[in-house]
């Protein structure tokens, strides 16, 4: 079955760029039934959607982060990635990747974020 | 952006109790709402999608209802493993937005 795994540095210095990768196994990232998303959770707080990407490269971002976020996909490696620039302590969080099930044929239907990675803690500190 | 407001923010309940959590959208989202359960240190788990469809493997004591702007998650008989935080999430349009969460605590 589908599995997702985040990877990347656990410590990033202020003003630098946070980079994470999510590896998809047990299925194809080129599936037409999924967007692939990044969600984060600051310590003791709720869930914040960062953005999502389709295998074609179509992206949607959280407006509050849009100027600093880039999400990309590598179908040859079955991976998608997150880059968040100019980080501050406020970007310290657990970062999750998730499969976001949607279909538009014959009409729109939403299946939810049904598979999540285990999460990776990223701390922004000098 | 569509704002999602959950209530209550926390609830104390006993094993066997019926628990209802409410989620209100700032504008109509049809039935494009999901519910998640999160336990400390764990990733969220999908419970309900499309407002009322039970995700495979989720116990039938969980149910969802609503459409438009008002939605509910009901746990018909609270079990010890249900003590957790619950989130709603809208998928009617991007940006995706989550509710603030409801913590279900032991009474």
Image (tube, rainbow, N blue to C red):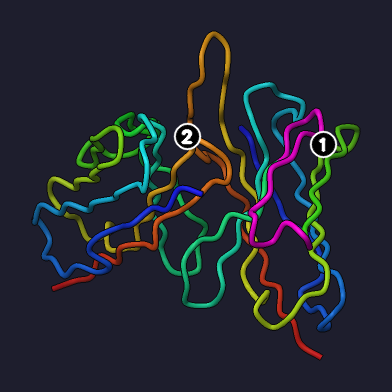
Quarter holding the N terminus of chain A is top right
Vertical comparison of B50 with B3: above or below: above
Residue on which disc 1 sits: A78
What is the number of the mark on residue B92?
A: 2
The image shows residue B7 at horizontal and vertical percentages of 24, 60
The image shows residue B82 at horizontal and vertical percentages of 27, 57
Q: Nearer the viewer, mark 2 or mark 1?
A: 2
Residue B96 falls within the magenta-colored stretch: no
Cα separation, mark 2 vs mark 1, equals 27 Å
Residue at position x 76%, y 74% in the image: A10
- Magenta-colored span: A53-68
Side (left or right) of A59 relative to A15: left
What is the number of the mark on residue A109?
A: none
The main secondary structure of the magenta stretch is loop
Vertical comparison of B36 with A28: above or below: below
Residue A55 falls within the magenta-colored stretch: yes
């Amino acid at each position: 079955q589908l599995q997702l795994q985040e990877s990347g540095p656990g410590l990033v210095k202020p003003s630098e760029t946070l980079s994470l990768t999510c590896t998809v196994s047990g299925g194809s990232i080129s599936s037409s039934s999924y967007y692939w998303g990044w969600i984060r959770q600051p310590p003791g707080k709720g869930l914040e959607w960062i953005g999502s990407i389709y295998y074609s490269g179509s992206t949607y971002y959280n407006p509050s982060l849009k100027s600093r976020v880039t999400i990309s996909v590598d179908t040859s490696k079955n991976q998608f990635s997150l880059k968040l620039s100019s980080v501050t302590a406020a970007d310290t969080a657990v970062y999750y990747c998730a499969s976001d099930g949607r279909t538009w044929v014959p009409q729109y239907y939403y299946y939810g974020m049904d598979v999540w990675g285990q999460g990776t803690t990223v701390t922004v500190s000098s | 952006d569509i704002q999602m407001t959950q209530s209550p923010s926390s609830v104390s309940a006993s094993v066997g109790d019926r628990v209802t959590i409410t989620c209100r959208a700032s504008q109509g989202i049809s039935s494009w709402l999901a519910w998640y359960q999160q336990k400390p240190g764990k990733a969220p788990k999908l419970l309900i999608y499309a407002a009322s469809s039970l995700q495979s493997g989720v116990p039938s004591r969980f149910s969802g209802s609503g459409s438009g702007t008002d939605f509910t998650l009901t746990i018909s008989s609270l079990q010890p493993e249900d003590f957790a935080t619950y989130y709603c999430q809208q998928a009617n349009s991007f940006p995706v937005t989550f509710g603030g969460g409801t913590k279900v605590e032991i009474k």
